[in-house]
Amino acid sequence: MAIPQVCTAPERAYSPGMRWHIHDESEAWGNRWLSVRKLDVEQPDGDRIDYHAVRLKHVAAVVLTDGGQRVLLMWRHRFLTDTWAWELPMGLIEADETPAEAAARELEEETGWRPEELHELVYSQPAAGIMDSAHHVFHATTATWTGEPVERNESDRIEWIPLADIPAMIRRREIVSGITLVGLQQTLLNQLSG
């Protein structure tokens, strides 16, 4: 019996020739958070097309865990989808902030907890084909309670949830936010790998 050959992608599939080129870009609409853009794009095969995309500020989030293997989550209503779900504390990175500074600020504003030390957990680009926003997720294991959250419009309640409960919550669609999923799943993967 012959052993099947492993098929490999042609070398050109990974060469700089497969790069798309932007010839022109203009704003169709925008505000201080996002900009809807119209682009004149040349595809790798030479065809030029009109393309629309969103340029959005980058986002930072924090997975805050405690010694009891719990994570701090916020129960939030998202009016655009009219859904309720658990989310990590998160927010937009301002022009004068590093991702870590924004993550720490958002955690404290939204939950009342100030992280003592943040470590980069995971970086993602949630929709790189249509949006250029980068998501930076940090992990903290210690934090100081500074008082009630100053951001009153962010969540209905804030709770410490056992990490062991997270997979079932994801299956029940109680956790659906992309940055929250990425951050929590990376936390669980890190636990598995020791």
Image (cartoon, grey):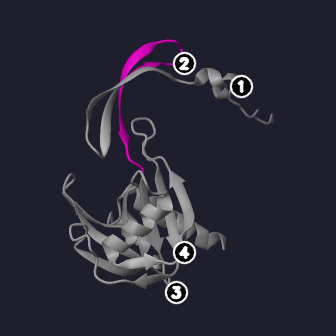
Q: Looking at the picture, does residue 34 appear above or below residue 177?
A: above
Q: What is the C-alpha distance between the residues marked 2 and 1?
A: 15 Å
Instruction: Tell me where the magenta segment starts and ends, as one range.
Output: 39-58
Q: Main secondary structure of the magenta part?
A: strand
Label 3 or label 4, whichever lies nearer to me, is 4
Q: CA distance from mark 3 to mark 2?
A: 51 Å
In this view of the protein, which residue sits in the foreground, 191 or 33? 33
Mark 4, residues whose alpha carbon is within 10 Å: few (<14), some, or many (≥20)? few
Q: State the image quarter where residue 148 is shown.
A: bottom left
Q: Note whether 190 is above or below 161 in the view shown.
A: above
Q: Is residue 29 magenta?
A: no
User: Does any portion of residue 33 appear in the rendered image?
Assistant: yes
Image position of 193 (left or right of 135): right
Q: Which residue is mark 1?
A: 11
The answer to whether marks 3 and 4 mark residues whose Cβ atoms lie closer than 8 Å is: no
Which residue carries the number 3 mark? 67
Mark number, residue 44: 2
Q: Between disc 4 and disc 2, whose residue precedes?
A: 2
Amino acid identity at mark 4 = Glu
Cβ atoms at labels 3 and 2 below 8 Å apart? no
* Residue corresponding to mark 4: 117
Tell which tag, 4 or 2, sits nearer the viewer.
Answer: 4
